[in-house]
Amino acid sequence: MTSSITRRRWLALNLGQLLQISTRPVVPAIASAIAPVIAPMLAPSVAPVIGLLAGKDAQAASSTAADPVPPPLLLAKVAGPQVDVARYLVSEKLDGVRAYWTGERLLFRRGAAIRAPAWFTERLPHHPLDGELWLARGRFNAVSGLLRQEQSADDPLWRAVSYKLFELPGTSGGFARRVGLLAQVTNDPALRHVQVTEQRRLSGPAELQRWLAEVIAAGGEGLMLHEADAPYVTGRSEVLLKLKPQLDAEAVVIAHLPGKGRHTGRLGALQVSSEDGRTFAIGSGLTDELRDHPPAIGSIVVYRYRGLTSRGLPRFATFWRMAEAQ
């Protein structure tokens, strides 16, 4: 989906903003919740302050278990207007949840383990795979909700979930070769829920735009363009591009801004910080449920926007949904 930065790093980068922008004093309960996460990331001179706010010293805060380590993933950049379509294999951008198979465990893109049923993973190869857990177009909330359940593996909805593969991490050769090798994984009759994401070679921009229009009309999100000859790389790279009619990105919630008028007494807007540290407010797109029960400080939301201002801030930022399950 959209960003590689971890929640812990985001909170560390934005600690000062969290303390300054909040409309209420930082109470011990909030400090206690964030101290174990942030203290290990801070300089020794700063970490004790967080411990004191939480009513404990930094040593105690630093002794908590480490956060999950995100797997190394390839992340897309936004496709520009001058894309040489012939260089790419093109697939539909699936509205599922990113899932990385280590060869032993299935992980969310931020490193936490996915509680999948044993039958779902027991026949997967002892080699890394990358893909998405997917139900159908427009059913992101359903699959995300499934994965957030404490007893997720027991839910019969898993029988409808597909593991849509689109990458074979660590394998030599270009992307086109790796896609061909992925087909071998799906030859096992016991892995009917595992499928290779369709990749197409398109003739040019006109065919690209036609397929984009078809996908959007059918309820899809957009298209992904992966450079056919590109070796396997990780991080955000131009070898992978996303093409969507609406842009979206993730941001961390750093404060709850009070409402006015008919929203007096509840949330008016979310103060958020983007991956590059820019802060702005998101007030549009919030439901009554979210205004009454706002996303927690430190949680990650996904917003849609229409380009950037001259200051680099998103135009018409609108809340879309909570980020995928962690």
Image: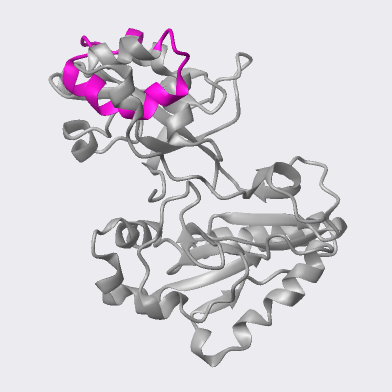
Look at 39% across and 62% down and name the residue there.
139
User: Can you say whether 37 is above or below 248 in the image?
Assistant: above
Look at 34% across and 60% down and name the residue there.
147
Look at 58% across and 89% down and name the residue there.
188
Q: Is residue 28 left or right of residue 57?
A: left
Place of residue 121 in the rendered image (x, y in percent of width and height, measured from the top left):
46, 75
The single residue placed furthest to the left in the displayed view is 265
Place of residue 244 in the rendered image (x, y in percent of width and height, measured from the top left):
61, 48
The answer to whether any part of residue 133 appears in the image is yes
Place of residue 52 in the rendered image (x, y in percent of width and height, measured from the top left):
25, 12
Picture colour scheme? one colour
Count of marks, rendered view = 0
User: Can you say whether 296 is above or below 83 in the image?
Assistant: above
Question: Which of the 4 quarters of the picture holds residue 264?
Answer: top left
The answer to whether any part of residue 283 appears in the image is no
Which region of the structure is painted magenta?
20-46
Look at 23% across and 24% down and name the residue there.
32
Residue 33 lies in the magenta stretch: yes
Q: Residue 250 versus residue 17: which sits nearer the camera?
A: 17
Q: Residue 137 versus residue 148: which sits nearer the camera?
A: 148
Residue 166 lies in the magenta stretch: no
User: Can you say whether 236 is above or below 262 in the image?
Assistant: below
Question: Which of the 4 quarters of the picture holds residue 238?
Answer: top right
Place of residue 14 in the rendered image (x, y in percent of width and height, measured from the top left):
44, 19
Q: Residue 57 versus residue 146: which sits nearer the camera?
A: 57
Question: Which of the 4 quarters of the picture holds residue 33?
Answer: top left
Q: Is residue 41 left or right of residue 130?
A: left
